[in-house]
Amino acid sequence: MIVELKNDVSIAKANELAIATKSILVENEKNILVTYSKVKELPKELEAYADAFFVTDTDLQLASRQYKKENASVKIGDIEIGGNTNNTLMMTGPCSVESEEQIETVAKFLIKNDIKVLRAGCYKPRTSPYSFQGMGLEGLQLLAKMREKYGIKVITEVRDYSHIEEVIEYSDVIQIGAKAMYDQGILRRCGKANKPILIKRGFGSTLQEFAQAAEFVMSGGNENVILCERGIRTFEMNTRFTLDLCGVAWLKDKTNRPIVLDPSHALGARYGIADLSRACIAMGIDGLLIETHPDPSVAKSDAAQQLDFAMFEEMNASLKAVANAVGRVMI
Ligand code: PEP
Ligand code: MN
């Protein structure tokens, strides 16, 4: 149950009530208490202090449409997705920052194509400890340099808790990758960050588990959570993963969060990214994450799935019409 407290309830009192009712106090514009969802009746201790209360079916609570019917808005500086907008935000860049020259070439390409968000990893969660692990702090500093120089926003991923402060400091959006989706240390720390958090779905996670990862961040006080479907593992081995569009329909219906899709990691090959992107946009989503590299043949990670600039431009030119057909605006 979610209980919105009256405005005149002090923080000290709200803390006391949280202990008495075994709930989490979420301090925001409106202070709220969130109890286990099995609580269906307003606890007696809260009767005098509650403004309103909401019951949801499961522990999908703050992110649930049963609590907030409207689409939640998330702002990345002056860029807005969700809320009352019909924006579909393009976020693109290489899988990894590899050098200053490489990332600057990409930043210039983004400017040329009027794209506002650069995505690139600096701490890569590789399946092998022997392959390229990312440029780490040096990569983050290069991203910050690109932001300064070109006025773009950057999204980059936190791989583990050891460098979380750096990632929070240097990025405009913090990406929690598929492999880190269950890391509660990362989720809880992001709950205290004042930047948007993009959570990718673990490839072996149910939709409920995925949506509940957002609850860890939101119940920490950070409402700015974006959910990203990036493919799940199925029996099918001809594609890297299986992009779960049924899951996207579920997330749109059951959650109030902005939804972003990442066809690059789902398919794992560049040939179908344009088709998949058009299909994703036709679903009326809030954003796309696409991997693009100046020369994918020499990419240090995910070489097979990254688009080159010509492929990206050809795809991008076709997205606007699809977006318009479903009442969306590509930004
Ligand atoms: C990435 O975005 O480069 C990445 C590693 O993705 P995922 O966490 O979805 O595997
Ligand atoms: Mn990648």
Image (spheres, rainbow, N blue to C red):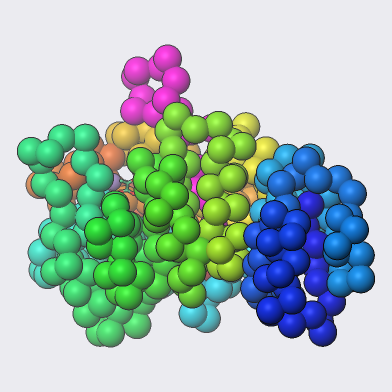
- Whether residue 136 is visible: yes
Q: Nearer the viewer, residue 14 or 74?
A: 14
Q: Which of 264 and 219 is in front in this view?
A: 219
Instruction: Tell me where the magenta segment starts and ends, as one range.
Output: 226-245
Magenta span contains residue 235: yes
The x, y position of residue 282, in whole percent, is: 61, 45
* Residue 324 placement: quadrant: bottom right
Q: Nearer the viewer, residue 120 or 56?
A: 56
Q: As drawn, is 81 to the left or to the right of 317?
A: right
The x, y position of residue 186, in whole percent, is: 40, 55
Q: In this view, does 28 lie above or below 330?
A: below
Magenta span contains residue 12: no
Q: Nearer the viewer, residue 70 or 218?
A: 218
Q: Of helix, strand and loop, which mostly describes the magenta segment?
A: loop
Q: Is residue 234 above or below residue 304?
A: above
Q: Which residue is at a point 22% across and 69% down the rendered structure image? A: 140
